[in-house]
Amino acid sequence: MQGYNYERLSAQDASFLIFETPSIPMHVAATTIFEAGPLRSESGGVDISAIKGATEAILHLIPRYRQKLAWIPLIGHPVWIDDRDFNLDYHIRHTSLPRPGTDEQLRALSARVMSHQLDRARPLWETWIVEGLEGDRFAMINKLHHCMVDGSSGMDIAHVLMSTDPDYRPDGDVPVFIPHLAPGAAELIRDELLRRASLPFQLIRDIRHMREHTEDLGHEIAIRARALQELVGWAVHPPSETPLNGTLGPHRRFDWLTMSLDSVKAVRKALGCTVNDVVLTTVTGAVREFLIRRNMRPEDVDFRVSAPVSVRRDEERGKLGNRVSSWIVRLPVEEANPLRRVEAIHEVTHALKNSQQALGVEMIMQAAEWTPPILMSLGARAASGPINMIVTNVPGPQTPLYLLGAKSLGTYPMVPLLEHTGLGVALMSYDGKLCWGFNADYELIPDLAAFRIAIEASFDRLSRAAGIHPEGGAVVELHVEAKTS
């Protein structure tokens, strides 16, 4: 008889379930725009059956797509089990804009789709195929719960269905899905008790491994202690309250723009910094302008962002789940000169690399594996840091990707909002472009368009200060706002 099978969520993966509330959905998402190409149907729509067939053909490569959550009794920790009632038609949805659909209408639809929580009784993902977009294009809106993926593993999933080869098609031989039996309550409790009993031995093995692979164990311990102390220090002194922060509602606004990656790299090279420094400096200028617009004095504001940092090792490539830490970066919003802003940002990020602050978050998540859910919740919130906003930048492929021959024109990512943070900025580089996605609380940020325009203006000022005069370096598109019904 087939035995039961399941996988326990890590503390970091489980933390994103703990964070979630009806007003704070914790899925990551993205809107990708395609040329219709060979997926154009005879009626002028999109061949949804081909997309479903291709997805079904690769599901065995992404087991998590056919798994759902279960919970260990009494302890309340989540695990993954196979969904015996998996229904692909539920997860892949087909809709249309009123023809000819505009990018404004696509943003409105994206905001509505992204506002709704995923159903925890099913596998935690949805894909919306949106036809009717003007210019012979269609869009794909992907939603995956953050407990499944981080930015890096999300990119790995994108590569499973899409390819750099326009002629690539998944193998037509679809493996039969035979779900494993789900464990019963007794098995889950027994396994958890055995796991907890083994933790001291795992700790001893970890210490022995660290001693064997570290030349100076005392120095390594001191670095980790300093990283944890620095993270706790941020928590003791909270950031300033700003118009970007407050109680979140259930509705969202979504906006995006596209920049030339060559223009961003030219600025990076001229200023001797990193692409991430250029991004954070651009965001700093936009936040400064936004605060002034809201009648605040930037000189009086301590504004902090969380910048996620991947700690995924090479051997973990292709695995789902979260392997991410974060930096807490104070943005110099009081500084009017863009060159001084980038100098300050570069100094901070350089110091963060040397101090290895990201180890502090990693240590909290490791300690959370030992704790009950209530303490894990406190640890997860401490690890998220006292911040005003998230800015995440995920590197993507610099060659075109194709979905069954349909060329991807750009992907605009969405990072979920944390409690009290009304705006999140996510970026993805792709095929010579830097794609920005802005996710905002509907009520807190009614002027999201102004922030998006401020991003472009901030980058333009930074470019000119660096002696570079980009010609249309950013393609700014019209803003739309959307409210869920």
Image: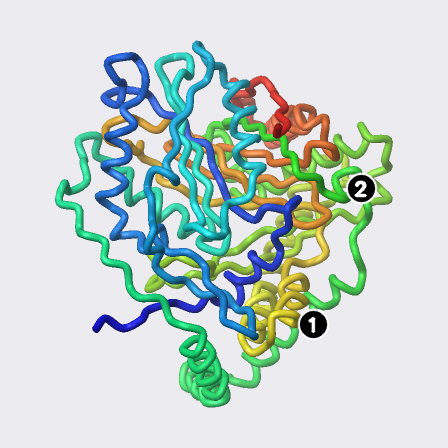
Instruction: Please provide percent x and percent y for residue 410.
Output: 41, 29
- Secondary structure under tag 2 reads loop
Amino acid on which the number 2 mark rests in the picture = Thr
Discs 1/2, front: 2
Judging depth in this view, the residue of 480 and 4 nearest the camera is 4
Viewed as shown, does residue 4 lie left or right of 293?
left
* Quarter of the rendering containing residue 386: bottom right
Instruction: Please provide percent x and percent y for residue 169.
Output: 18, 36
* Quarter of the rendering containing residue 353: bottom right
C-alpha distance separating marks 1 and 2: 26 Å
Instruction: Please provide percent x and percent y for residue 48.
Output: 29, 27
Amino acid on which the number 1 mark rests in the picture = Gln
Judging depth in this view, the residue of 210 and 246 nearest the camera is 246
Viewed as shown, does residue 359 lie left or right of 251?
left
Q: Which residue is mark 2?
A: 242
Judging depth in this view, the residue of 304 and 90 nearest the camera is 90
- Secondary structure under tag 1 reads helix
Q: Which residue is mark 1?
A: 229
* Residue 340 seen: no
Say which residue appears at 48% left-offset and 33% top-offset: 412
